[in-house]
């Protein structure tokens, strides 16, 4: 299956700071999604972004499919942004392959 | 519009018992997926189903695990004779699937998960 790698594995930010999370994938994708797993374990859909750029409030994402990477930008971080951010990719077999995540801690 | 529903949210079983996990997809979604998350790890695909059909079960252990998505009712993931290594969070996801004209027909939405603890 496709390999999905995320960096950095851990990130600690002061409230108000900006950050960029990276996701590299090893093959062409039909689907690329970003999720936030909150401290209660729930997976929240952030972006469906197999290519291009999208923005939603303080979050935005860009996928450069030809170069096989995606970036998630978080601006003006808040303590509620804490949790684990997962990137997941699908190549046409319908199942998502997840990266190992970036654990974000935002401190007040 | 209710999201993906899973129950129970927490399940405790003793070794050797059976665990049944239920998943109701989002309204209008005909594709269901099950994933397992071990502590401190990402999610791993187990099985992909459509109504009355298993499409891909390549991620599911060959023994003790089975899944179904009947014509009526929720999808069920069944684990027989549970062992301690089965302790994990089990997530269900659904997607609209083609046809429909949606460019995001394969976007998956996840339920809250069932946390299985085997004593």
Image (tube, rainbow, N blue to C red):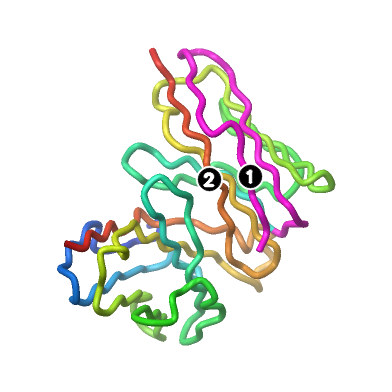
Q: Is residue B110 above or below residue B17?
A: above
Could you say where residue A104 lies in the image, as x and y percent from the top left? Answer: 47, 29
Q: Is residue B57 shown left or right of residue B73?
A: right
Could you say where residue A89 lies in the image, as x and y percent from the top left? Answer: 64, 54
Q: Earlier in the sequence, mark 2 or mark 1?
A: 1
Q: Which mark is residue B84?
A: none
| Range of magenta residues | A1-30
Query: Which chain hosts label 2?
Result: A
The quadrant the N terminus of chain A occupies is: bottom right
Q: Which mark is residue A100?
A: 2
Is there CB contact under 8 Å for labels 2 and 1?
A: yes
The quadrant the C terminus of chain A occupies is: top left
Residue B88 quadrant: bottom left
Instruction: Check disc 2: other Cα within 10 Å, few if <14, some if 14-19, many if 20+.
Output: many
Residue name at image x 31 percent, y 70 percent: B22
Whether B50 is among the magenta residues is no
Query: Which chain hosts label 1?
Result: A
Residue name at image x 77 percent, y 46 percent: A68
Q: Which residue is mark 1?
A: A5
Residue name at image x 34 percent, y 37 percent: A39
Count the marks.
Answer: 2
Instruction: Check disc 1: other Cα within 10 Å, few if <14, some if 14-19, many if 20+.
Output: many
């Amino acid at each position: 299956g496709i390999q999905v790698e995320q960096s950095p594995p851990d990130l600690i930010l002061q409230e108000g700071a900006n950050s960029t999370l990276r996701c590299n994938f090893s093959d062409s994708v039909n689907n690329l999604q970003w999720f936030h797993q909150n401290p209660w374990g729930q997976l929240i859909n952030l972006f469906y972004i197999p290519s291009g750029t999208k923005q939603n409030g303080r979050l935005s994402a860009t996928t450069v499919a030809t170069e096989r990477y995606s970036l998630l930008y978080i601006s003006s971080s808040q303590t509620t942004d804490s949790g684990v951010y997962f990137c997941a990719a699908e190549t046409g077999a319908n199942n998502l392959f997840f990266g190992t995540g970036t654990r974000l801690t935002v401190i007040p | 519009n209710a999201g993906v529903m899973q129950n129970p949210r927490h399940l405790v079983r003793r070794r050797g018992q059976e665990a049944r996990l239920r998943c109701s997809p989002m309204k209008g979604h005909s594709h269901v997926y099950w994933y397992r998350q071990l502590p401190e790890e990402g999610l791993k695909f187990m099985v992909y189903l459509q109504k009355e059909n298993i499409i891909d079960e390549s991620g599911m252990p060959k023994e003790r695990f089975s899944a179904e998505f009947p014509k009526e009712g929720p999808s069920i993931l069944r684990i027989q004779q549970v062992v301690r290594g089965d302790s994990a969070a089990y997530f269900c996801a659904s997607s609209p699937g083609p046809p429909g004209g949606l460019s995001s027909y394969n976007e998956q939405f996840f339920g809250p998960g069932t946390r299985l603890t085997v004593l």
